[in-house]
Image (tube, helix red, strand yellow):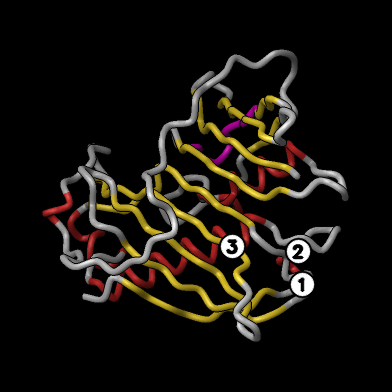
Amino acid sequence: MNPVYTKRAWLGLDSFDVYDRIFPSRYLTLAQDMAGEHADLLGCGYADLRPRDLMWIIVRTRLDILAQPTDKCEVILTTRVKKPAGLIFDREVEIRRADDGLLLATSISAWCVSNLETRRLVRPSEIAYPDTFEGPYIYADHLRAIPDFQPAGEPALVRRVNFTDLDHNRHMNNCRYADALLDAISPREDEHLTSLEINYEHECLEGDSLSIYLERPNEKGEGRARAVRGDGVLSFKARFTIT
C-alpha cells in the first residue's frame, strides 16, 4: 500500500472568481476527489466500506493558498496519508503548477470512518490502511478545534441548502461550505483569501437554512465564522486570513 498518490488535473476558467483568483472550493474539491481515488487504491474506498455500512467523513480541513495561477492551467497534486492518531486519519495535499512546479496551495484534512446507521466512529484497525508512512510532511501538527465566539448583529449571509449542494450521502457536500463562507465574506478586489480552515460540526440536509455570522478580520487579517442551521444547531466553525 503506497501512502503517497499523485495525479494531474485541469484548472479551467470556471475555477476562478471575477478577479481571476482561484475559488478555494475548487482546490478542496480536487483534494476530496483525490482522497477518494487514493482510498480506492488502498482498498478502503466507497465501494469497500459501503457494504459494511461504513463511510469516510471529513471533520476538519485547512487550505493555504500560496500563489495564484491567474489563468487556466494543468496542476499536479500529491497527497500523503499520515499514521492514524486515535480515530483521526490525517491527509495532506500539495498542488503545483505543472509547467514550472510553482507551489500553489497546500492542505490538510482530518478524516474519520463512521458507521452509517449509528453515526459512531470506527477504529482504524477495522479497515485496510498503509502501515508505513512517507514524509516529509507539510503540517507538523493535527488540526485543532477552532474556538467558538458569540456573534453580534445580523448574519452576513442566510443561505438555503439546495439539491445541487448534496453529495452521495444526501448531505451538503463539504466543499460547498467553503463557497457559502466565501459568499458571506464577499472579498473585494484588493482582499486576498490566503488561508481557510473549517470544523464540520453537524450535517446539513436539503432545505436546511444556514445563517453565517462573521467576526471581522483583526489587524493581522484573521477572521472567524460560525454557521447555524434554522433549528439553532451549529453547522460549522471557520477561520480565515485575508491579506
Of circles 1 and 3, the one toward us is: 3
What is the x, y in percent for residue 229? 56, 27
Mark 1 belongs to which amino acid? Leu
Quadrant into which the C terminus falls: top right
Q: Is 177 included in the stretch rendered in magenta? A: no
**Range drawn in magenta:** 204-211
Instruction: Classify residue 238 by image quadrant.
Output: top right
Which comes before the other along the chain, label 3 or label 2? 2
Mark 3 crowd level (few <14, some 14–19, many ≥20, 10 Å Cα): many
Using the image, tell me which numbered label, if any, was put on residue 13.
1
Task: Verify CB contact (< 8 Å) between mark 2 and mark 1.
Answer: yes
Q: Residue at x 59, y 14 (%)?
A: 150
Which residue lies most toward the bottom here?
Answer: 99
Can you identify the residue that label 3 sits on? 105
* Secondary structure of residue under mark 2: loop
Position of residue 203 in the picture relative to residue 164 (left or right) = left
Q: Could you tell me which quadrant the N terminus lies in?
A: bottom left
Residue position for label 2: 16
Contact check, label 1 and label 3, Cβ < 8 Å = no
Q: What residue sits 38% from the left and 50% below the top?
A: 140
Q: Residue furthest left?
A: 125
Residue at x-position 36% and y-position 65%: 136
The numbered dot on residue 71 is none
Dot 1: within a 10 Å radius of its alpha carbon, few (fewer than 14), some, or many (20 or more) residues? Answer: few
Q: Amino acid at mark 3?
A: Ala
Query: What kind of residue is marked 2?
Result: Phe
